[in-house]
Each structure stands twice: as structure tokens, then as C-alpha cells.
Amino acid sequence: MNDNPPPVLEMRNIVKRFPGVLANDHVNLKLHPGEVLALLGENGAGKSTLMNVLVGLYRPEEGEVYARGEQVDIGSPNDAAALGIGMVHQNFKLVPTMTVAENVILGMNGLPFRPNMDEIVECIREIARHYNMPVDPKAYIWQLSVGEQQRVEILKLIYRGAEILILDEPTAVLTPQEARDLNRVLQVMIDEGKSAIFITHKMDEVMAFSDRVCVLQHGRVVATKYTAETNPQELATLMVGREVLFRLDKAPSQPGDPMLEMRDVHAKNNKGLPALQGISFTIRRGEVLGIAGVAGNGQRELAEVVTGLRPVTQGHIQIEGQERTNRQPLDFIKAGVSHIPADRIGMGAVGNMPVSDNISMKGYRQSPMAEKGILRPRQMLRFAREMIKRFEIATPTPATRIKFLSGGNIQKAILAREIDACKGLLVAVYPSRGLDVGATEAVRRRILEQREQGRAVLLISEDLDELFSVADRIAVLYEGRVMGVVPAEEASIDQLGLMMAGSPAEEIDVPTARVMEEV
């Protein structure tokens, strides 16, 4: 890439304020034709806010936006769409009770009163085939995995003819294989003349996907570099202002008594189809069992049956030797089970409640936050302030409604609540999704602290680096079955990849898999 072609998009001196926060401080940004620009920064650095200004969700206090050399006024998402600008948000903008096709056309101008849904469904199928993003246009959103919902958001933009795509943490819900697929989708789009802004915290994806990198810190641009002229360590240091460890040293595991035992567990998904088919494993105190797998292979259902959120149709679940099969979620909580859910907005937090109330949700039933069934607000506030400081949650005040925090800081609040409440088993589903490199390092340290304190951790993650870094053993799910459980220190990426594709561990030639990885 070079600066000779005029920018297809330019933002000049953008300033955006919220109560108590200067989110964007005179930000300048350029996007050239046929370019992928990576936008980096810590959680709360202003990345999503800047992009929300660009798509008309926020009005800046100062600054101008230029599209194809002409100054434009983007007062709404419709204005942005008319300019060919579309955004896939970190928190999806989909209606769960509607189908994929209905979501794709929802709010579009120029449609007849009764659109021909058969034609629309076929068009979506054709786009999905062209970009190799399989999704059923007739499926309801609530029936889809998080990864499948991500594809719907991208398909929606393509269907509407977006020429400038803004992708906010698009691979946070994808496996490494799906992330590579997304890279191929992006390349097809770029070859077709489109441009993209790619917000991510994953350094390997910055290096693989982007042409240039723009780094934000505290709402200001601190560096803009050509990707080929930088490296992950330099970018991480620019983001957080200190050296970041990408791999953590951990002491050898010293497993204790069994904490969670699953015996031939079966469960159905939201469509009533088999999701878990004969799951059996044991997690002991003082160890981390990682769960790998392509999205939609039973990870969601596994987390829900272990926390009492989904009924088991067959099999047994025991917590510390006590039968807990098909008990209520409160029974699992009382048994010492904490849950960091995949959907932090829909399940992990209550957006209109203050940060302090969200952090107190696990402790409000007993002293010191309650006495004889009566809440004690001062104790709740004291606890919230302690957690905000301990987990470095960036919030103007504890009374701020949690929906106004950045996605990463919402995740930190959930982590604070669940880790503090954990007494025996921590079920962590994508705990570092959407977090910057510094926060990711901190989250992984917290998980290892739980292990060192004698608690068991069920870590469900689509980030294989995270599993290698944190887990003691790794189990791979494929179509609701465990393909095998391997020690993390002996596993290879290709071995896990073959298992994720449906090959049982005992059928894989491990030396061959390692040779493939080295090649």
C-alpha cells in the first residue's frame, strides 16, 4: 500500500465526549481504496466510539468526515449506508425471534410492502456460497451459535452493498480456522474493490489481515504504521505502554479431589436436536481442563448443563461427589460453581443496572451485602469499589450503568464478580474474548490463580494459544462428542485441528501432526 491514491474515507480531528470521559481526542484517520486498516487499542481506548461516529450512531462534538474526497454529514446509520459504509458491531444487532433472511432485510429502504422472501432467501444463499460463509437463511437467530450470528452480520452488510466495512472484533467469536476463513472473505472483498477497518486485539491477525495499523491510547492516535514494518511486540507496547507477556509461565499442575464429574451426558440444543452425545470427563481441584472445538459443536450446551441452565436428557453430573443432574442454577451456585458466559451482554450483565449492582449479583443474598433479606447498599458499594480497583475496570463511577462501559470493561466486571464468588468450579466461556493484550494477560493470570488456590476450571475457548497457555489438559468437542483429551504440553495445533474436524485422538498419528505443524 502507498499514500498516492486519495483516501476513500477520512476522519479529521474527531472529538467525542461522554459524561466524565473524553472518548476521542482530535483523532485523525485515513482509509485508502483496497486497504485493510487495523485499529488497535486497549479496552476503552475509543476504537468502537470512533467507528460509531463513522456509522452515524454518535454525533461528534468536533471534527469532519470525508468520503471519496467530499465532506459528508453522517447523522444516522441510514446516512452511512447510503455512502456504502457498514459496521459489524461487537455486540450483534440482530432480532433473536426473526429468521436470518428477515434480519438481513430489516430496516432496508425501497422494499415492497410484501417482499418476495423466496428470492431474498436464494440471494442470501448465493452470497453465502460466494464468500464461503455457510448459514441457513430460514433459521431463527436464537437457534444459531455466536459464530453463526457473526456470519449473519457480515452477510447483512454484503447484501446491502457496503463498500467500506467496519469489523469490530469480528474474530472474537471465531476459531482459528474460521478466522482464516474470514481473512479469505476479506481478501475477496478487497479484490472486488472494497475497503475495511478491522478492530482487533489479536496480534497475529493484525499481521495477517491488515495493510496498515493505527494505534489508539486514551482516545488519541499514538502511532500509524505499515504492518510490514512493525511486529506484535512493538504494537502491544504501543497499546498498553509496557511490555506484554504473550505466554505465561505456570507451575506443574497438582490435581486434588474430583470437583466435576460428567458421566455419559446427553442434551439437546435450542432446535431440539442432539447437542451433547455421551460426554464423559472429570475435572479435579487444582487443574484447568480446556475445551476446544469449532463453534456450534456443543460448547454452549456443555457450559449450560454444567451450570444448571440446560436440562440433561441422559447421564449424570456430580459436583464434589454430590448428584446435581437437572438441579436449578441456584443449586449449582450454592455448590460453588461460577459462570463466565459467552454472551456477556445478554446473559452476563444487566445493561440498565449500575456497575456496582452487576458486580454484587452473586453476593447479595448473604452478609455483608445483606442482613435478614435486606440489602445493604453501602456494603455493596464498598465491595464494588474494591473489585473495580482490583480488576482495573475503567468506569466513571460505580453508579454508571454498565451498558455505557466498553465491551472489555463489561467483561472485566463479570470476571470480578464470578472469580470472587467461585468456591470450587469456575466455568469460563471465552473469558478473554474482546479484551486487549494487557487485559488478556491479566485474565489468564486470574484463571491460573484459581488453579493455584485449589479450584477447578472448565475453560471453553476457541483461542488455541489461550488453551496451550492456561490449560493442563485439552478436550476437543466435535458434534457434541469428545474426540479425545490430551495433555496441553504434548498437544500440537495440527493434532487439535484434526480432532476439531472429527478425527478421534486415537486415530491421529501424533508425530505426523507435529511434522505438518513444523512445515
Image: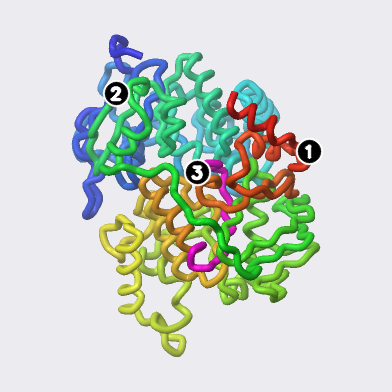
Q: Residue furthest bottom?
A: 372
Foreground disc of the pair 2, 1: 1
Residue 392 image offset from top left, x and y in percent: 32, 57
The quadrant in which the N terminus is found is top left
Secondary structure, mark 1, is helix
* Disc 2: CA contacts within 10 A as few (<14), some (14-19) or many (>=20): some
Q: Which amino acid does label 3 sit on?
A: Phe
**SS class of the residue under badge 3?**
loop
Query: Which residues are drawn in magenta?
Result: 451-465
Q: In which quarter of the image is the C terminus?
A: top right
Residue under numbered circle 1: 507
The residue that label 3 is drawn on is: 92
SS under mark 2: strand
Q: In the displayed structure, would residue 402 be above or below residue 138?
A: below
Residue flagged by tag 1: what amino acid is it? Answer: Glu
Q: Earlier in the sequence, mark 3 or mark 2?
A: 2
Question: Measured along the vertical axis of the image, is residue 133 above or below residue 92?
Answer: above
Sequence-wise, the earlier of marks 2 and 1 is 2
Q: Earlier in the sequence, mark 1 or mark 3?
A: 3
Assess disc 1: are there few (<14), some (14-19) or many (≥20) residues with their C-alpha within 10 Å of its C-alpha: few
Q: Would residue 298 be counted in the magenta stretch?
A: no
Towards the viewer: 506 or 221:
506
Along the viewing direction, whichever of 211 and 97 lies nearer the viewer: 211
On the image, numbered disc 2 is attached to which residue?
30
Relative to residue 16, is residue 473 drawn left or right? right
Q: Distance between the residues labelled 1 and 3?
A: 39 Å
**Lateral position of residue 82 relative to residue 461, left or right:** left
Does the magenta segment cover residue 464? yes
Q: Are marks 2 and 1 in contact (CB under 8 Å)?
A: no
Residue at the (53%, 32%) spot, across then down: 154
